[in-house]
Every structure is written in C-alpha cells, then in structure tokens.
Amino acid sequence: MNTNDIRINLPASKSMSNRWLIINHLLRNIDSSESRPNGVFRIVKLSSSGDTRLLRRLLTQLEQQTSDVFYCNNAGSVARFLMPLLALTPGSHVLTGDKRLQQRPMAPLINALRQMGLRIECSEQEGFLPVTILGGTPTKRTVQVDPLLSSQFVSALLLIAPTLPYGLSLTMTGRPTSRPYIDMTCNALRLAGANIRQSSNGRTYYVQHLDDHPKPTTINIERDWTSASYFYTVVLLRPELRIRLLGLQFDTSQGDSATDAFFQQLGIVSTEVRSPYRAAARSITIQNSGQRSKTVQFNCIDCPDLVPTFAVAGAAVGVRTVLKGVSNIALKESDRMQAIATELSTMGALIETTKSELIILPSKLHMPKSNIIHTYGDHRIAMAFAPLKVLFPNLMIENPEVVEKSYPEFWSEFNKCIATGTN
C-alpha cells in the first residue's frame, strides 16, 4: 500500500441494511426473547443512508403503533418492502410517499399480494401509491409476480415468506431486472435460517415456514459497491491518483460490483488489499493504467443504478459507450434516461437512445452554459456527475444535499479527491 493513497470511507450497503432490518423485525415475532429486544440479530455497520434511517423510523412507528400512515418520501425499496409487512399486520394502514414515488410502479407487488388473499386498495390510481392496506393472513401459498420493472417486488415477497404459515411458492413470470438483488435477499434469508430452493429453470422459489428459533448472530453489513463506482470515474479523470476504497471486497452478492468489469475496459485496475491476519479483504485500491478501449459495451440489466456512472465516465473520456438493458432506468427516483441525456447534451455529448440502449458517441465535453448540472432530486445523478468537477472545477451540482438518500458523507469524501495533490 502506498502511504499517499487517498483513502475513501464508503458507506455500508443500504440494500443489505434494509433487508436485514426487515428480517430482524419479522423474526422477532418468532423469537420474542426479552433478552434481545432489538431483534434476533445484532447488525453491525448499518447504513447511515437516508433510506435506511427512514425504514428504521417506520418500523419503530409500526412497532409502537404511533400512526397508521407510513410516508416513504421517494424511497421505492422502503415502500415495496413495507407493503407485504403491513399486509400481514392486523389493522388498517396507509402507505404513501412523495409525488415521484406515487408515479413509480407498484402494480406487480399489489397484484401478487392480492393473489395471496391479502387486501390492498389503491386510493387514487390503480397500481400506484397511495394504498390502504387491511392487514390479515394470506389464504394462498402460491403466487406469481412480474419482475421486469423491479426485482424489489420479488425480494419484498421473499422477505416475508419464512414467517408465512405454510411458506411460499413464488414464480417469476419473466426475466427479472437486477437479479443479483434477489440473490442478495436469498443469501440473507438463508443466513437467518430460512430454507429456500429454486426450480431447475430458476424462475420459482420455494420457501419453507421457519419453525425453529433463529440462532442469534452478528451481521456485518458490507461496504457499498454503488457508492464506490463514483471514485472509479475520479481515477479515470485523474490518472495520477491511486484511491483506496476502505472495506470494499470482491467476494460479494452486490450486483454493482460490476463496476470493476466496466472500468477495466477503460483501463482502471482494481487490486484487493488483504490482511495477513484476517481472511476478509480490507480494501480495494484502484488506479489508472492509461490503456483503454476505443469502444466499451456493457449490459446493465443486473446493475441499472450504475448506468449514470458508466454514461458519464464514457462521455468524459470521449469513448464510444454502448449501455444495454437500460429500459427501466426511467422508473427510478427520476427519469434517469432523460436526466442523463439532457445533462450530458448540455455539455456537448452526442447521445443516442432506444428503449433498451443508451449510446454515448465520441465527443469532447465542455462546461454547460449555466455552469449547473440539474439533479432532478436524484442522488445517483448528483454523484455520477460530480467527478466532472475534476475537468471543470467551477461546475455546480444542483441540490447537492440529495446524496443524503444513500451516501451522506459523499461530498466530504469526494473533496479529498479534487484537492490539490494527494493525502
């Protein structure tokens, strides 16, 4: 390790954190030992993200029954994970969020819960929030769900499955987007003691009811690969730097570890730093080899959150960049397809889009006339475009506070990279 490496503190994975919060809440009902009032598992290094703090607050609200209105801001995963949980909780509950969340699809999950005999009523527009949920017990143990728009529909149902009286048989009616997130859910449930099998074609999950009390254990939340991706772009644009991403590891169920494979095409070399005293990696260092391809291609169907990062990186170095499997990014916290195309175009990038592809043509970026990158209230847009400040120090990121949603410490860590020299 070079002592001049810039050391970046990455946040814990909010995807893992939120899954374990739901699991801990549900399994508390199986093992209600007074000696473990906070749940069966001790969760270490929980994410500090706004989404995770929101989920913790809403779970406390549910436990203490302080309100029957669950407001999820613009947190799609929080709303989708809570919906099945509320459907199993006696009483009447209202699940809602801000204007953007009310535009994001919920129909596949709503329809799946209705198939199970649970009662959910859409208050305004069918298939969207807000919804009124009348908690009860499912009458059917088989369900079909369309995973095309979001893998979160599948994960949300799998998370409740081990606590259902007869378990659950869940069949996906198509190819899921972001399948690694479903695998992450299954890995967490198995670690919690659940019995999960898959059919030979991988489309059906069989989850048994969890009869035994879960064995208490400590859960260490991994560092977040999506957050790491922005620093890969920094190293791409500042070849003299070597960045050490603390706590990150290649051995992970996080689909966004695909960051490494994409940036290899742009000449970024990633190396694990291991301790001689521990099996787990301590960090990953990244540096620029200076050897990049003239054209890069990547299928982002399993890692859609990385599309803004990849698009900005390709445009920044003038490399033809073909990103496939991007059809659902318009359904995120913002219409990311439009946001990426609009903001990069104002900087001179040449962009072509189809329903499932985003193509960045070779061009040279310049400062936008307004000096501002509009973020559309989207944390991923803000962080993906931030590395362009390396090229254009006076570039302004609108509403920089939106990063609180996933990486509250982003700006303090990012500023280490654009300061003169190295730390």
Image (tube, rainbow, N blue to C red):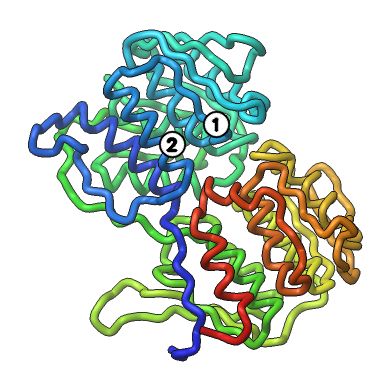
Residue positioned 52% across, 50% down in the render: 406
Judge whether 218 appears above or below 285 on screen.
Answer: above
Residue under numbered circle 2: 54
Residue kind at label 1, given as amino acid type: Asn
Q: Residue at x 44, y 53 (%)?
A: 13
- Which badge, 1 or 2, comes first in the chain's sequence? 2
Query: Along the horizontal axis of the image, is 212 left or right of 188?
Result: left
**Residue 232: x, y in percent?**
61, 71
Q: Left or right: where does residue 333 sit relative to residue 198?
A: right
Q: Give whichever of 105, 333 is nearer the camera.
A: 333
Q: Nearer the viewer, residue 151 or 224?
A: 224
Q: Pointer 2: residues within 10 angstroms few (<14), some, or many (20+)?
A: some
Residue at the disc numbered 1: 73
| Callout 2 amino acid | Leu
Residue 35 point in image, percent of width and height: 8, 38
Nearer-the-camera pick, 207 or 214? 214
Residue 9, quarter of picture:
bottom left
Residue 120, image x, y percentages: 50, 11
Q: Are the residues at dot 1 and dot 2 in contact (C-beta closer than 8 Å)? A: yes
Where does residue 28 sit, x and y in percent of width and height? 21, 31
Q: Tell me how far mark 1 sits from mark 2, CA to CA.
A: 9 Å
Q: Residue at x 58, y 62 (%)?
A: 258
How many labels sit on residues? 2
Is the residue marked by circle 1 packed among few (<14), some (14-19), or many (20+) residues within 10 Å?
some
